[in-house]
Image (cartoon, coloured by chain):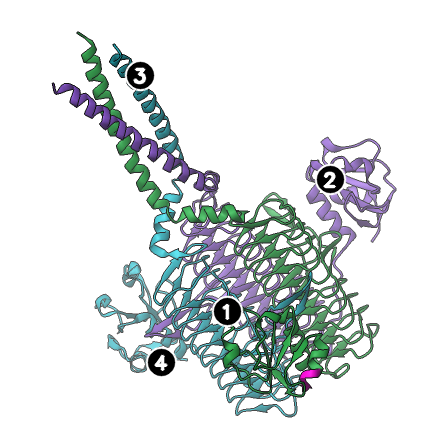
Chain colours: A purple, B cyan, C green
């Protein structure tokens, strides 16, 4: 794809400064870019590279504009660049209809321009919306509903009756609707609690590779509109995640917990079951959340505490051996002092007795 | 499936109180249930909902029985409800024999009523027991043995020579028999130690989505009867897990460690290699087990310590900054005291010298 | 495979002591071995088993040599044994060319003696080197390049344009080239930053089951020659890992971080983004690395600190409740002392006033 800088400026709603006719065919970092590339400056730390880059044009904030460069000026250069990448490198999914070797149940309903590649398996009662791409090895169980413009990458699995909105993306090996982990005890033996609920992924949810979202025991597990889930995240049965949340890799959320909107869980965080985390909660990497968190809270640690407290605790933690030494030294001084006081008391006493 | 309350009571061995003829067609929570639903009360916290639920009948403990409701009285309402769900919502796996598009080696032996769906791949020398269901994308390597009434969900993989007992369940994307992680050093280079052992999953073992169980270097990795493994658990080569254990999501067990029976590892726990954990050990979420644990121990923390100790440590940990302040303040007081003592000692001295 | 002890000694470059003609057909542990087996002693803790084993021969270090046994003496018994296992139990991958039911794009280039099993899917523009084995359910996206003698186990996925060197192994369910987790904020909404880079796995890289390596946003994610990656490891976009590293199960490395050569990350370690870890860095299990680490550093803890410091901190940590008690007790003594000093000061004062 090739665009003039003028076309790019118009498409991005950016202000153009420089040669409107320059042809841009791709994107690159400031360091790697050539004259045919668009680049960007998001972190002012790298501002010096604006002098040395060979990029044909750069997206910058107004304050970082430079005279001798073709610039697209935008209040949010990273966002503008993301959009430019999408324009210059549009997704190139195969467009082959139902490829021979795909197995589609006779009663499945496929919308316009759906692609189903060989090796995909679509069960009875499935509905797939227009423009959705289904890669090899994908399995859609009985009665699954998939919206429009979704991309289901190779070997993603959606088990029976689950529902995906529009523009949902499943990276390779993602599993939606596996059985929740629920057993009743019968003495030592564990008896499966059949998981008869479903999973709902709302519009614009994206799910990482090998991430697993369990179906509900009863009712549904639900991920809210626009929430993005990284690779190898585990979401247990009956969890409810709000809108526009960010769940980083290797996070685990236990059963029946509820997250508000715009919650951010950093990598490897664990959340105990049956909790409520309010809107905008932020949890630091590797933390463990043992209790409810009100909206707007930022916590860290395992178990988690307010982030500011955690910073202070960490500051002292490293000095624990020092602290113990100090304590021991003080105890010695204290004992000496007590000794000398007793002695002087004794002296005083003896002095008093004539 | 529809059953009368009387039929349900008989099937569950529960005492019936109320209208024996009421028809039940499904299950729901107390909150969501309608007149056609069976519900249950497991947690007395929700006892108030017994007054407001629209459920056609509820399973309760004797103490929670209410007059105006159709009740099934059971000493373990959760277990009875789990069984009721299984009766009212029986599994509906496809029953299609070997579907065209499945690849089954000519010498593979399939029992009665085995289903193998299109896209599954069964290698030479495989044996599959009666009633087992094999979903699309499942791979069974050379010489694999699978018992009766197993369910192997889409894209589960069992590599060569591994053995699965009866009623084993593999959720989507589970991997059994991947190579153990073993390398010998040859200077800086790492030389693979060929992993020539196998994995054995005994009867009633259930394995979560994207969980991985590595084959042994020599001999076997073994998971005992009735043990349940959640999603994204990693079990390394030559590990031995006992019976009726519960391994929660994202747990990792390093090579050659041995777990007794009824061990519970909570989410994201890590266990170091070559350890022995006795029967009934319980390890708290996100803990790291660095040494052997005797039967019945409950531990927490990373590294783990007895759970009671860990609770006490956590109690103090948050107050570390306070503790340090206190220590500093005390040191100041101590120094003052020493100063005044020296001063008074000096006075006393000077006083003594005439 | 059967070899005489003499043939084994020659192949391994080991010194033979004993019966050169004894036939060895397999390997086993000292405990399990019979007369047809080769075994080895790597850990001197088990030296007693040299007396009781029924093994036909054992590989030992010179110092552990025993008279009454057929011995192969090697300076590195574990390495020698690894090689012996490879000789006696050579890999037995299917050798079937392109099996019917495999889908290979007409323009894909397959080298000599490549095996592609049914259910594998090879896109346009793919090149596969000689002797590589591609198992069922494997997906190679458009333009993927795979070297010689690779093994891609069932359901492994390599997305478009990624590059694998020679002798690369992907365990089942491994995912190479999934989209990196990158979004720009547009108010509350998250806008995907299209991930247009690739992943490069250099020669002799091995990747565990359900491990995920994300493609770069721009440029490449690269894993250096000989690096071994265990199961369920997550490597984010634009990460660079050096040569001969060891990444143990459930490790997570955040975006754009760089690891030197021979780095070892133990199980469940997390590394923050945009960091640099020098050659030979070692990180203890479950640690979290929040900052750069110079070459040769060994760290532990979450957040990580030098390992020696961490050991000392852990030593005190368990005694925190004790420390607090001590502090309280000392404060009491201090207060008493202050009281008695004031009192004696008061006495002294009163004494001074005539």
Q: Residue C5 magenta-drawn?
A: yes
Disc on res. A41: 2
Disc on res. C45: 1
Nearer mark to the viewer, of 4 and 2: 2
Chain bearing tag 3 is B
> Where is residue C344 shown, x and y percent of the image?
21, 20
Q: Which residues are magenta?
A: C1-6
Disc on res. C249: none
Residue C341 image-quadrant placement: top left
* Left or right of A251, for residue A51: right
Is the N terminus of chain A in the top left, top right, bottom left or bottom right quadrant?
A: bottom right
Give the distance between the C-alpha atoms of the residues marked 3 and 4, in whole angstroms.
Answer: 97 Å
Disc on res. B3: 4
Quickly name the residue at label 3.
B346
Question: Which structural element holds mark 3?
Answer: helix
* Left or right of C124, for residue C193: left
Residue drawn at point x = 33 percent, y = 65 percent: B54
Residue drawn at point x = 68 percent, y = 44 percent: A79
Badge 1 and badge 4 in a common chain: no
């Amino acid at each position: 794809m090739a665009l003039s800088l003028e076309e790019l400026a118009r498409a991005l709603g950016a202000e153009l400064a420089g040669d409107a006719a320059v042809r841009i065919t791709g994107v690159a970092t400031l360091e790697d870019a050539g004259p045919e590339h668009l680049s960007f400056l998001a972190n002012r730390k790298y501002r010096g590279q604006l002098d040395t880059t060979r990029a044909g044009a750069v997206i910058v904030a107004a304050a970082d504009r430079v005279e001798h460069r073709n610039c697209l000026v935008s209040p949010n250069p990273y966002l503008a660049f993301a959009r430019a990448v999408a324009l210059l490198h549009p997704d190139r999914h195969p467009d082959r209809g139902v490829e021979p070797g795909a197995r589609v149940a006779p009663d499945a309903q496929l919308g316009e321009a759906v692609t189903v590649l060989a090796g995909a398996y679509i069960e009875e009662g499935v509905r797939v919306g227009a423009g959705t791409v289904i890669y090899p090895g994908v399995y859609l169980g009985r009665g699954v509903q998939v919206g429009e413009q979704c991309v289901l990458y190779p070997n993603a699995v959606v088990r029976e009756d689950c529902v995906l909105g529009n523009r949902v993306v499943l990276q390779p090996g993602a599993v939606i609707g596996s059985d929740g982990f629920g057993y009743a005890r019968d003495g030592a033996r564990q008896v499966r609690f059949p998981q008869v609920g479903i999973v709902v992924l709302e519009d614009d949810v994206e799910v990482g590779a090998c991430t697993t979202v369990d179906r509900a025991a009863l009712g549904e597990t639900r991920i809210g509109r626009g929430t993005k889930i990284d690779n190898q995240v585990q979401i247990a049965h009956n969890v409810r995640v709000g809108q526009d949340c960010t769940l980083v890799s290797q996070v685990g959320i236990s059963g029946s917990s509820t997250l508000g909107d715009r919650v951010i869980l950093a990598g490897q965080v664990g959340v105990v079951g049956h909790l409520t985390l309010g809107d905008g909660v932020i949890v630091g990497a590797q933390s463990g959340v043992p209790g409810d968190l009100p909206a707007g809270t930022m916590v860290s640690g395992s178990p988690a505490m307010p982030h500011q407290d955690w910073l202070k605790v960490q500051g002292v933690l490293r000095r624990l051996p020092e602290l113990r030494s100090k304590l021991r030294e003080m105890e010695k001084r204290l004992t000496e002092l007590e000794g000398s006081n007793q002695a002087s008391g004794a002296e005083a006493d003896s002095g008093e007795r004539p």
